[in-house]
Amino acid sequence: LLLGLLLAPALSIPAWAADNTIMIHDPYVRLAPPNAQATGAFMLIKNSGSTDRKLIKAASPAAKTVELHTHINENGIMKMREVPAINIKAHGQTELKPGSYHVMLIDMQAVLKEGDSVAITLSFDDGSTQQIAAPVRKIQVTAMPAEKGMAHGGMKH
């Protein structure tokens, strides 16, 4: 059952739905912490066409709810917000990355493990769709280096 939910089916895309101007590069899903019910999917979307395009929807059998999100700074506090679309400029690209635009997978149907593959269908404003298989990756968070003179040992608590 888990494999059926997560693995992208090998479907041929009808010619009317194929889009050769939008290319998806390096898609991945962030490995969620234990018991987390949501995670994000990230990728680079390139538009080689002469018309601006929009990603307007995403869907996945791996989650009950799938939304397009971004992060905003509201009075100095970073907050995640759903957006109606993500723009991809003509002859340009938009990176979906942590802290920015991303596909939010909410109420996961199964626990994801590193190396699993998540099927995601992306829908664009011209009616085209693309199905991708995004591998689950553990994201390494690096600690920020202590500023000179600000080492933790010198702090008073």
Image (cartoon, helix red, strand yellow):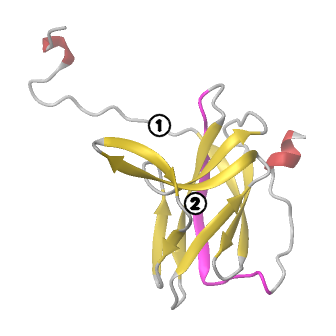
Residue 30 vertical position relative to residue 145 in the rendered view, above or below: below
The quadrant in which residue 17 appears is bottom right
Q: Is residue 44 magenta?
A: no
Mark 1, residue position: 140
Three-letter amino acid code at disc 1?
Gln
The quadrant in which residue 134 appears is bottom right
Residue at horizontal 19%, vertical 8%? 157
Q: Position of residue 49 (x, y in %)?
A: 54, 88
Return the mark for residue 50. none
Residue at horizontal 52%, vertical 89%? 51
Q: Position of residue 45 (x, y in %)?
A: 54, 69
**Left-right relation of 71 to 2:** left
**Left-right relation of 38 to 157:** right
- Residue found at the very far top of the displayed protein: 157
The quadrant in which residue 60 appears is bottom right
Q: Out of 75 and 62, give the one closest to the viewer.
A: 75
Q: Position of residue 28 (x, y in %)?
A: 61, 52
Q: Out of 14 and 79, give the one closest to the viewer.
A: 79
Q: Out of 99 and 143, give the one closest to the viewer.
A: 99
- Under circle 1, the secondary element is loop
Three-letter amino acid code at disc 2?
Asp
**Left-right relation of 157 to 39:** left
Q: Position of residue 62 (x, y in %)?
A: 76, 46
Return the mark for residue 26. 2
Name the quadrant of the N terminus: top right
Could you give the CA–CA distance between mark 2 and mark 1, rounded to whole angstroms? 17 Å
Residue 73 vertical position relative to residue 48 in the rendered view, above or below: above
Sequence-first disc among 2 and 1 = 2
Residue at horizontal 50%, vertical 72%? 87
Highlighted range, magenta: 16-33
